[in-house]
Amino acid sequence: MERNLLVENGIKIQFGGVNAYSSSAIMSRVVENIKASKYTALTENSLSVDEQLGILDKPEAVASKLAQLLIS
């Protein structure tokens, strides 16, 4: 029987530091990337930078908008 062990995230945190891979650090990078328009192509230019940032502020409103887009 073959056994595998997934250690990717633990290794990164151990050697990269919690500050680089904590939830807070990850979300900070997401916000920086949004502000740099790095995710605009992923939305096929349908969401502006402000709308993308709004997703992080008001997830309920985003869920509603996504539902409307999926229905139409």
Image (spheres, grey):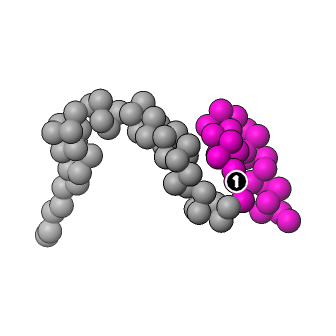
Q: As rendered, which of 67 and 58 lies closer to the eye? A: 58
Q: Is residue 71 above or below residue 14?
A: below
Q: Quadrant of the N terminus?
A: bottom left
Reading the image, the residue beneath label 1 is 47
Mark 1 burial class by Cα count in 10 Å: few <14, some 14-19, many 20+: some
In the rendered image, residue 34 lying in the magenta stretch gets the answer no
The residue at the point 27 percent across, 31 percent down is: 18
Which amino acid, mark 1?
A: Leu
Tell me which corner region of the image, top left, top right, bottom left or bottom right, holds residue 59. Answer: top right
Q: As rendered, which of 67 and 42 lies closer to the eye? A: 42
Q: Is residue 25 above or below residue 51?
A: above
Q: As rendered, which of 26 and 63 lies closer to the eye? A: 26
Q: Is residue 43 left or right of residue 32?
A: right
Q: Position of residue 22 (x, y in %)?
A: 35, 33
Q: Position of residue 49 (x, y in %)?
A: 64, 46
Q: Position of residue 41 (x, y in %)?
A: 59, 63
Q: Quadrant of the C terminus?
A: bottom right
Q: Is residue 6 left or right of residue 47?
A: left
**Boundaries of the magenta span:** 46-72
Residue 51 visible? The answer is: yes
Tell me which corner region of the image, top left, top right, bottom left or bottom right, holds residue 20. Answer: top left
Q: Position of residue 26 (x, y in %)?
A: 41, 39
Residue 55 visible? The answer is: no
- Furthest toward the bottom, the residue is 1
- Furthest toward the right, the residue is 72
The residue at the point 77 percent across, 62 percent down is: 70
In the rendered image, residue 62 lying in the magenta stretch gets the answer yes
User: What secondary structure predominates along the stretch shown in magenta?
Assistant: helix
The residue at the point 74 percent across, 54 percent down is: 66
Q: Is residue 26 left or right of residue 63?
A: left
Q: As rendered, which of 25 and 61 lies closer to the eye? A: 25
Provide the secondary structure element on which disc 1 rests: loop
